[in-house]
Image: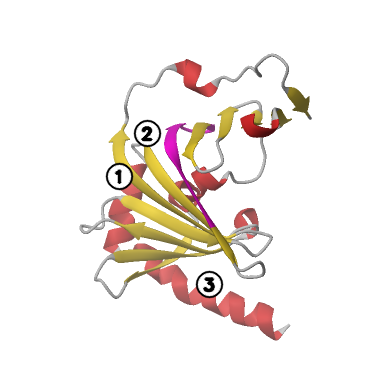
Amino acid sequence: MRRITLLLVCCLCLAAASDHPIWVNLRSTYLGLKTLSGLFTENICSEKEGTCTQFEGRFAISLPDRYRLEVTEGQKQLFVSDGVNVWAYLPEFGRAIKRPPGGVAPIMAFLEPILDSTSTVEVAKDSSGIYVVKVCPDGDMSAMGDLVLELNETGTQIDGFSFRDGMGQKLHFSFYNQDWNPKLDPALFKFKPPKGVTVEK
């Protein structure tokens, strides 16, 4: 009971921080976002296993629910959401996994608090003077803990974010060469398993 009470107090204390001008301006900017593309690096670290794995690749997002995440460095993988189905393609293993949409996709995690007007946050600066936004979790984001958004020098763009997943792993994304509201080919958000690939549902 004490832990729950402390969490509620924490959230109530952070509520006022949601009016911080950096957060207000950031939300206003991102509410005009329709599409986004660029390059990324992703680090997945497990304290339990004592391991860290890095991936690099390209991403494309079309709001509200279409995305493509293509890992080109590290173990090659492809994740595609067409708004109806979510595909995970693992070419090394000749497997494709098809799932209905649901939950929060890791690549979309940074947008969840931005699009939710009820999000409570704490805005601060890290040791290098860069703005960071700590998000107070709610029921919809219960699978993500310690979500932190890392902003650029002017506090107007999200350049990276990190969180802990339900398995206790820490995920960290960094974005590069971001292209705002580009015209994206609809084919980016479609996937057809190559011939001979095992499809799991």
Q: Residue furthest top?
A: 195
Q: Of the numbered discs in the image, which one, if any, rests on residue 11? A: 3
Q: Crowdedness of circle 1 by 10 Å Cα count: few (<14), some, many (20+)?
A: few
Q: Which residue is mark 2?
A: 37
- In this rendering, position of residue 51 left or right of residue 153: right
Q: Earlier in the sequence, mark 3 or mark 1?
A: 3
Tag nearer the camera, 2 or 3: 2
From the image, tell me which residue sits under label 1: 29
Residue at horizontal 60 percent and vertical 76 percent from the top: 7
Which residue type does callout 2 highlight? Ser
Query: Is 69 placed above or below 188 here?
Result: below
Secondary structure mainly formed by the magenta segment: strand
- Foreground: 59 or 198? 198
User: What's drawn in magenta, residue-wise?
Assistant: 53-66
| Front-lying residue, 32 or 133 | 133
Alpha carbon separation for disc pair 3 and 1:
24 Å
Q: Nearer the viewer, mark 1 or mark 2?
A: 2
Examine the structure image and report whether residue 33 is included in the region drawn in magenta.
no
Residue 5, image x, y percentages: 65, 81
Does residue 79 appear left or right of residue 1 in this picture? Answer: left
Name which of mark 2 and mark 3 comes first in the sequence. Answer: 3
Q: Compare residues 198 and 116 and report the one nearer the observer.
A: 198
**Under tag 1, what secondary structure?**
helix
Quadrant showing the N terminus: bottom right
Label 2 with label 3: CB-CB less than 8 Å: no
